[in-house]
Image (cartoon, rainbow, N blue to C red):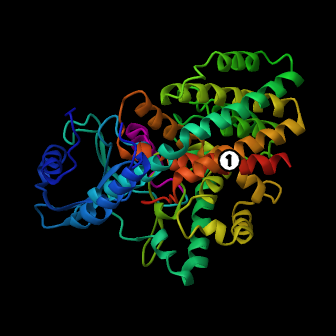
């Protein structure tokens, strides 16, 4: 693997010459996609020797020891391949993978480009918020209704709901165990979550980064859900909780929490006892735990003398905002 | 040493320079986002520089009293005793930032253990008092955030 990632046209050209040498592809256009918190992304158009053109999205790891949020490209690639065509919701078509970083300097996966507007863009128009909320709820419900037997066997499966939640709460309470600074708000929240369990719900397929920006809406036809790097088998309410506090306006849950949850219950068959504002808050804490842990670790790296870039210190604000929200949830549980 | 302008004033002046002189000249979107983030971090840092020593010392005193109160009602909590002993042994007389931070970190650990102990033992009044201490900590963090809001998606 090269020292630095090179997500650019010449690297893609060399890669295509290797994986599709017989098709005579030429990179006709290439531009980085900015805006994500974690991965390096780019959009490329390739003209094949037979005159056909195709567009692709490239997703690569950032340089090592930079940034805040990390995920496993190998796992994402395996999951993308395994779920392709098997979920009730459409997912990106996986095309090629530079698994060693030989061509791009970092692991890089390439999927078909999908022509659609991010749901988050559609939701920017106030008139469209109700429709966007319906699309979001329906898409999420479809993900959660995925039969578990279509998922790859290597996805971790808990023995049951109780042990799964027990593990998540324990994980929450240990988030700061590998960093120098204990976070009392976290320990308080974990203690209250341990003491006040919600009613169980069937474990299902969880997206892990469920937000409107990860749903692409075409002019016609079904939507496509992207960014499956955190896909796992878990409690579906983790996705609801994760999104419920996402500070990217307009938040389609916060716009009408009761309407949002009523539609979700209708689509999934879960009860009001299982899915309500309180249980969503509970799972907000659990759904955010992994990202919060990564924010802790990035800030701690700097405290140990290893810079992870400005994002690490910038996101300390996110840590403060998140732990404050955790305390509010814990306090409500206790009351 | 030169004490005026204060550290806070110097950092805020750097923010002004970044936003009014540097940022308008940038055309690269990634560089623009970086500068905006750096400016935010500098504003965060300015607030910290102005208040962090006082805040940490005030909170430490409050936390120690609280943790001792919890230990008094949960005498079997060994980990709390250990955390309190570590706090007592901290370099608490020094005002050098590293020492204040070290003491505050030990206080934070004591508070974590005390809160867990209070919740597990259903010590309702002490849970409430612990929440108040967390509120103070959160209010300081909010001030440090200096109006932060997330960018990107």
Could you tell me which residue is drawn at 50 percent across and 60 percent down?
Answer: B149
Whether residue A180 is situated above or below residue B148 in the rendered picture: above
Q: Nearer the viewer, residue A172 or A312?
A: A312
Could one spot residue B68 in this view of the protein? yes
Q: Nearer the viewer, residue B45 or A26?
A: B45
A268 with respect to A305 (left or right) = right
Whether residue A136 is situated above or below residue A109 in the rendered picture: below
Could you tell me which residue is drawn at 20 percent across and 33 percent down?
Answer: A3
Q: Split into 4 quadrants, where in the image is the N terminus of chain B?
A: top left
Could one spot residue A284 in this view of the protein? no
Q: Nearer the viewer, residue A34 or B32?
A: B32
Q: Residue furthest bottom?
A: A127
What residue does disc 1 label? A326
Quadrant assignment, res A45: bottom left
Report if residue A82 lies within the magenta region: yes
Residue A277 in the image: state x and y as whole percent. 75, 59
Whether residue A167 is situated above or below residue A46 in the rendered picture: above
Residue B106 in the image: state x and y as whole percent. 62, 25
Residue A124 in the image: state x and y as whole percent. 49, 76
Report if residue A237 lies within the magenta region: no
Quadrant assignment, res B25: bottom left
Q: Chain of mark 1?
A: A
Question: What count of labels does the image hold?
Answer: 1
Could you tell me which residue is drawn at 46 percent across and 37 percent down?
Answer: A299
Residue A9 in the image: state x and y as whole percent. 15, 54
Q: For the magenta stretch, what is the residue range?
A: A69-87
Q: Nearer the viewer, residue B82 or A7?
A: B82
Q: Split into 4 quadrants, where in the image is the C terminus of chain B?
A: bottom left
Whether residue B84 is situated above or below residue A265 in the rendered picture: above
Dot 1 falls on a residue whose secondary structure is helix
A192 with respect to A213 (left or right) = right
Could you tell me which residue is drawn at 56 percent across and 74 percent down?
Answer: A132
């Amino acid at each position: 693997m090269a020292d630095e990632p090179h997500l650019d046209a010449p690297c893609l050209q060399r890669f295509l010459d290797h994986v599709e040498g017989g098709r005579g592809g030429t990179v006709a256009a290439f531009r980085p996609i900015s805006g994500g918190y974690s991965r390096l992304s780019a959009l490329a158009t390739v003209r094949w020797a037979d005159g056909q053109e195709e567009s692709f999205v490239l997703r690569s790891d950032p340089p090592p020891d930079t940034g805040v949020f990390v995920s496993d490209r190998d796992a994402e690639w395996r999951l993308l391949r395994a779920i392709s065509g098997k979920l009730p919701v459409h997912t990106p078509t996986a095309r090629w993978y530079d698994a060693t970083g030989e061509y791009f300097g970092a692991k890089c996966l390439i999927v078909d480009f999908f022509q659609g507007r991010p749901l988050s863009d559609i939701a920017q128009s106030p008139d469209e918020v109700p429709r966007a909320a319906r699309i979001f709820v329906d898409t999420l419900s479809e993900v959660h209704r995925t039969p578990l037997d279509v998922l790859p066997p290597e996805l971790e499966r808990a023995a049951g709901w109780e042990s799964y939640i027990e593990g998540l709460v324990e994980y929450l309470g240990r988030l700061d165990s590998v960093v120098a600074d204990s976070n009392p708000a976290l320990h308080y929240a974990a203690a209250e979550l341990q003491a006040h369990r919600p009613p169980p719900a069937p474990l299902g397929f969880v997206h892990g980064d469920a937000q409107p920006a990860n749903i692409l809406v075409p002019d016609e036809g079904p939507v496509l859900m992207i960014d499956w790097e955190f896909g796992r088998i878990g409690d579906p309410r983790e996705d609801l909780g994760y999104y419920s506090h996402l500070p990217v306006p307009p938040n389609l849950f916060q716009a009408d929490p009761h309407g949002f949850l009523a539609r979700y219950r209708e689509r999934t068959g879960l009860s009001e006892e299982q899915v309500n504002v309180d249980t969503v808050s509970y799972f907000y804490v659990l759904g955010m735990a992994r990202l919060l842990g990564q924010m802790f670790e990035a800030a701690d790296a700097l405290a140990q003398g290893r810079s992870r870039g400005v994002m690490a210190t910038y996101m300390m604000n996110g840590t403060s905002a998140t732990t404050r929200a955790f305390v509010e949830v814990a306090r409500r549980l206790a009351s | 040493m030169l004490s005026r302008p204060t550290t806070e004033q110097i950092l805020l002046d750097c923010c002004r320079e970044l936003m009014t002189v540097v940022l308008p000249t940038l055309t690269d979107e990634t560089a623009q986002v970086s500068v905006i983030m750096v400016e935010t971090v500098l504003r965060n840092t300015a607030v910290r520089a102005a208040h962090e020593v006082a805040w940490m010392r005030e909170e430490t005193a409050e936390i120690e009293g609280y943790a001792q109160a919890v230990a008094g009602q949960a005498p079997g909590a060994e980990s709390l005793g250990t955390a309190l002993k570590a706090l007592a042994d901290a370099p608490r007389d020094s005002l050098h930032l590293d020492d204040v931070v070290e003491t505050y970190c030990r206080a934070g650990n004591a508070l974590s253990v005390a809160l867990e102990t209070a919740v597990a033992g259903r010590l309702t009044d002490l849970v409430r008092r612990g929440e108040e201490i967390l509120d103070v900590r959160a209010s300081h963090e909010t001030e440090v955030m200096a109006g932060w809001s997330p960018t990107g998606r």
